[in-house]
Every structure is written in structure tokens, then in C-alpha cells.
Amino acid sequence: MGLGALYEHELDAHGVGAVMLTHKWQPTDLLAPHSDIDVRVLIPQAPADWEEWNHRLAAAHTAAVGRELAHRRLLEHPPGFAFTVAEADGRLVTAPELATWSLISGSARDFQRWKSRAQMAPWCEVDERFYRGILQARLGGRYRLAADSTDNVVEDIAAYQRHCVAWHYLAPCWFAAAALATRTRCPGKTAALTQWRPDGLDGYAELFLRHAEDRLEARPQSPQQLLRAAHVALEAAMRRVPDSDDPAGRGEDHARTDWSMTAGMLRVRVARWLYYLDPPPGVATDYLIRREAKELRAATRTLTALAADEGTSAQRLAAQMAALVPTGPTTVGTLRATLARWHRQKSTVQDFLSHTPGDVHP
């Protein structure tokens, strides 16, 4: 049984009720044994109890990780998003996010329709934010190799660190730069390195594709050497990226997708926190707990913008949810306290996570 089928089986066995599973990036972007699978869950409708649903999801993920030692890394964390089919069908999943998806299970016909629409949608401000966000998170010294934990890596630490430089730093930035330079939504990292090669950048693209295709030399570069090469390559690539612009402004449609994307991310947070706080024996999660802070800060910024002057019931709901999201560093204590707070404010959390963003006004 493949990993995707195994994961689908565990979700079914625990009553998660997924009708489609996808993962971020293309199959060629997932490099065994180092790449983890970032799953997106699609469900037919919002559950009556999101908290209970998250407990099921966490239990399913824990069971899947426990099947094999390598799953500690391959299934590093529970899914990153949960959406309803209606949200995906109603274009409430942003086009740049959906363009990266690959199907694990579910309706291939629906999936291909969504992917085609995502590729054909006009370029807009949402795209600019998505791709520039990838760059802003990594460039200017923000990427730190030491922050890519090796705690759950079970073989060849140096090879994993080279993978981190190539696939967590260079390739995502190349992917984003290619999209911004061409105003097209590239499906993945390998495709970007293969297809976007402005004059003078062929050698850099080939260097990092050799990593992807396992064509390393007999004496491969050290992670630090590869990191220096990545800095030089990206400095050259960024000269081909145009300055930021705002092709369509922020309208109500963007507010609706902002709501859905934020809700989609927050819907699975409880499952992540439960897994991080009580992982299977031998699984390290401290670095994953620290990483939550970045996602939660982004959610708070979006919720605050959506709340605006709190003139509508939806805006007031966004403000109430923003108040429940921690904004500082994330620790074991932070997550435990937030789980307790969300349980006490269960009706607010349930209302926000299940809200259909039809009346959101920026």
C-alpha cells in the first residue's frame, strides 16, 4: 500500500469523512526519503463539531505515522488545510495554492476542473501576495539552515541538509520568482527549475535539478557550499523579478478567499497541536511547535484586516476569532492554553470555521 492510500485508509478508519485528499507540490517535487507530504483534506460539508473532527484527524495521523519509522519525516505533520468541496468548487481556494496541488484520492474529474480554472484565472493581487510571501519568508538572510531540524531524519544527515538548501530555500524561491517574472502559476519546483531559465541562469538551474534527480557527483558539495551557491543563484534570479504591483486591488472576492484560506488553515490547527503535544514515541515535535507561530501570526493579520470596523456580523466574528489566536512565540504551554481557550469558546470557533464567506466586506 502506497503512502497516500495508507493515509486515506487511516482517515477513513477514524471517521474523518474526507471525499478528496490532495498534497502540495507535484510528485516530481517529493524527493524520497527527505520530502514530507503536505496534505489538504476536502470534506463534503463542515462537521457539526470541528473540535471532535480534529481529534479524529489527529488520531488518524498518529496511526499513520506509527506504521513505519520513515513516516516520522514523510508525515511530519497533520494536514495543512481543510476545505469543503463547495469552497473548492466556488473558487474560494486561491488559484496559486490550488495550482500546486496533486491528487491523492477522490474525483479526478472535479480535481482537473479546479486545476484548469486555477491555471486560467486572471493574474491578480492574490497571486502577488502568495508568491512574494514565499520570497519574503526566505530572502535577505531569513532562511536559516539550522532551523531545518534533522530530529526526525533517519538516514544521511548531510544529504538531508543539502535537500533543505535546495528544496526548502532555492527551489521555492525559484518557483516564486518564475511565477512573478512570467505572471503564470507554475505547478511546482521541478517545473520552475526546468522551464524558467533566463539568460545566464541555466547553470544554476541545472545544479539544483541534479539534486532533485539524484545525479549528485561522487563528492557532493557540503550543505554550506550549496547554501553559498544558492545565495548567488537567487541574487541573480531576483534581478529578473519585476517590482511589486497591484494588478486588481483588494475587492470583496479577495476578502472571501482570504476568509476561506484562513479558516481552512485554522480548521486543522487543533489536530496539529494534539499531535505535537502527544506525538508517537521517538517523534520530535519541538521545532514544529515553534514553527506554528509564523502561521498563526499570518492568520491574525488576515483576521484583523477582515474584521475592519466590525460593522457586519461576519466582521465581528473575524474579530472574535482573532482574539483567540496567539500572536507570540509558540510553546507547549501556548498550545495547551490555546486548546483550552478554544474549547471554552467552542461556539465562536465553530461559527467561524463553518462560516460561508458570502457577506464578508473588506
Image: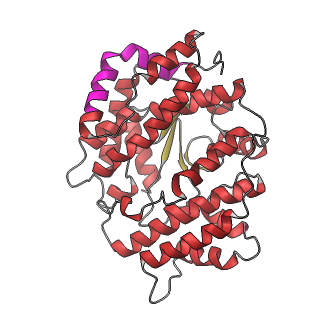
Q: Is residue 339 visible to us here?
A: yes
Q: Residue sitting at 36 percent across and 17 percent down?
A: 346
Q: Residue sitting at 60 percent across and 31 percent down?
A: 258
Q: Position of residue 87 (x, y in %)?
A: 62, 29
Q: Residue sitting at 72 percent across and 43 percent down?
A: 118
Was residue 332 drawn as part of the magenta stretch in this picture?
no
Q: Position of residue 171 (x, y in %)?
A: 57, 64
Which quadrant of the rendered structure holds the C terminus? top right
**Which residue is at the front of the view, 88 or 358?**
358
Most common secondary structure along the magenta stretch: helix
Res 124 → quadrant: top right
Q: Is residue 44 visible to us here?
A: no
**Which residue is at the front of the view, 15 or 265?**
265
- 198 relative to 132, above or below: below
Number of callouts: 0
Magenta stretch, residue numbers: 335-355
Which quadrant of the rendered structure holds the N terminus? bottom left
57 displayed left or right of 69: right
- 291 relative to 299, above or below: below
- 351 relative to 300, above or below: above
Give the farthest residue toward the left.
Answer: 281
163 displayed left or right of 334: right
- 90 relative to 76, above or below: above
Q: Position of residue 132 (x, y in %)?
A: 63, 49
Res 305 → quadrant: top right
